[in-house]
Image: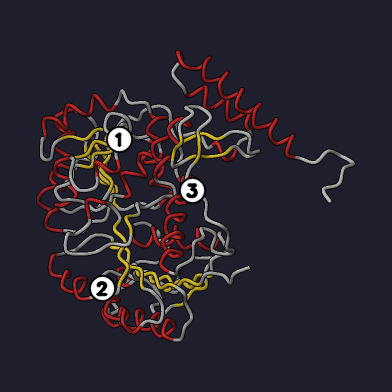
Amino acid sequence: MAERLRVGMLAPIAWRVPPVHYGPWERTVSMLTEGLVARGVDVTLFATADSVTRARLSSVAPHGYAEDPLLDAKVYECLHIARAFEQAASGAFDIVHNHFDFLPLTYARLAAAPLVTTIHGFSSERILPVYRAYNDVCHLVAISTADRHPDLDYAATIHHGIDLKEFTPRTTRGDYLLFFGRIHPDKGAHVAIEVARRTGERLILAGIVQDAEYFRTRIEPFVDGQQIQFVGSVGPPEGDALLGGALALLHLIQFDEPFGLSVVEAMATGTPVIAFSRGSMPELIADGSSGLLVAADDLEAAVAAVAQAQRLDRQAVRAHVERHFTAERMVDEYVRLYNRLLGHAVDDPRRRRRTRPAGGRCDACHERKTHVYQSRDGLLTVCSTCARGIDVSSQDAETAIANVVGRAPAAERRTLRHRLAARQAMHTTRRERASPRPGTSSC
């Protein structure tokens, strides 16, 4: 058995990991770290001392500098990054995974292990010289195709994933519109207010105030506590309730957003998203199914979309996230990347095995697909399209057939049931023939 994969995970230190309320970078680091630990990876997490993790925690900053004005951000950033790379220089890690933006890239040629850097968005064009200078020695990961910069080379594009257990799916639509994000001109809270005023719908604004002048002049004058409410930043339990209770999330962004965790989180509760079609939004939202994409800055289209969003199937909205944005899928893709960079042709970080062609033949559509899932008993194989959001791998064949057929259009159900039952019977027969009969010897 091969030695365990050793990863040094370098988190930001503005907030703890995972954050109590705001902190999207830190939340993603937590999801990835805990997922890797669950798979047997030896992870050292470099984060604030109050962080909560099952990994080995290494800290310099007592808590996030965004929460304590007495901490000098630059001082603790330097000490934090130096600690991680001093350990890396001693050969402690097979991979160093940087989520700290551009500054750690300057250590790339000094590290003994490959440096993977997830770019959580470019704060400014002014930081690009660092990325260009270390482009040849760093393995960059984009969080969306839209956020890839043409001057840089990328090892992968890996969308963020979320823990579905943190989000309660609701099948009935809510009774208010929701803005969920930073109170900053980029996020378009002022546009959400205008949509609410034109539709007459109630609007709740939730998020940290990142631009005080913008809040004072463009947001606060409209907050009346009745039609327009501001509740500030909220933690995971409150966020789940707010997201799930909305009739739609308004994500009317004024910039090309690299990802947008709140978009995926809203859909995880079954709440559709109305978004301007900028940045990564077309990669996250299935237009007309999990939400509605409208042309950038088209206010009239956004207003009209409110009525349309209320007719969307909330189960289909949730299913879209189950297929594409789980933490498990994100962890899978990062493990594959680590092993590829290390020259390991394996997916399991704890053992080597022969590689097999990706995918398989779906028992529902009879086509070979890249992404297929086997039932728990191994008697049924269904592709992600035919599964329609069903977690086939956690069910036996009989249960999976019933659920997959139940999600299919009524006109297809009878044929699909017979087809899947026949394939199950075929796999059962093959398994029985391959098994030795009782009392016989294989010698």
- Tell me, yes or no, whether the two marked residues, 1 and 2, touch with CB atoms within 8 Å: no
Specify which label sits upstream in the sequence, 1 or 2.
Answer: 2
Q: Position of residue 85 (x, y in %)?
A: 38, 82
> What residue lies at 50% left-to-right and 33% top-to-bottom?
362
Residue in the foreground of this view, choosing between 105 and 309:
105
Mark 1 → mark 2, Cα distance in angstroms: 35 Å
Specify which label sits upstream in the sequence, 3 or 1.
Answer: 1
Task: Kindly identify the amino acid type of the residue bearing the numbered disc 1.
Answer: Ala
Q: Position of residue 382 (x, y in %)?
A: 51, 34
Task: Kindly identify the amino acid type of the residue bearing the numbered disc 2.
Answer: Asp
Mark 2 → mark 3, Cα distance in angstroms: 30 Å
> What residue lies at 30% left-to-right and 68% top-to-bottom?
66
The mark found on residue 357 in the picture is 3
Q: Position of residue 94 (x, y in %)?
A: 46, 74
Q: Check disc 1: other Cα within 10 Å, few if <14, some if 14-19, many if 20+.
A: some
Q: Is residue 93 left or right of residue 421?
A: left
- What residue is shown with label 1? 286
Residue in the foreground of this view, choosing between 361 and 206:
361
- What residue is shown with label 2? 136
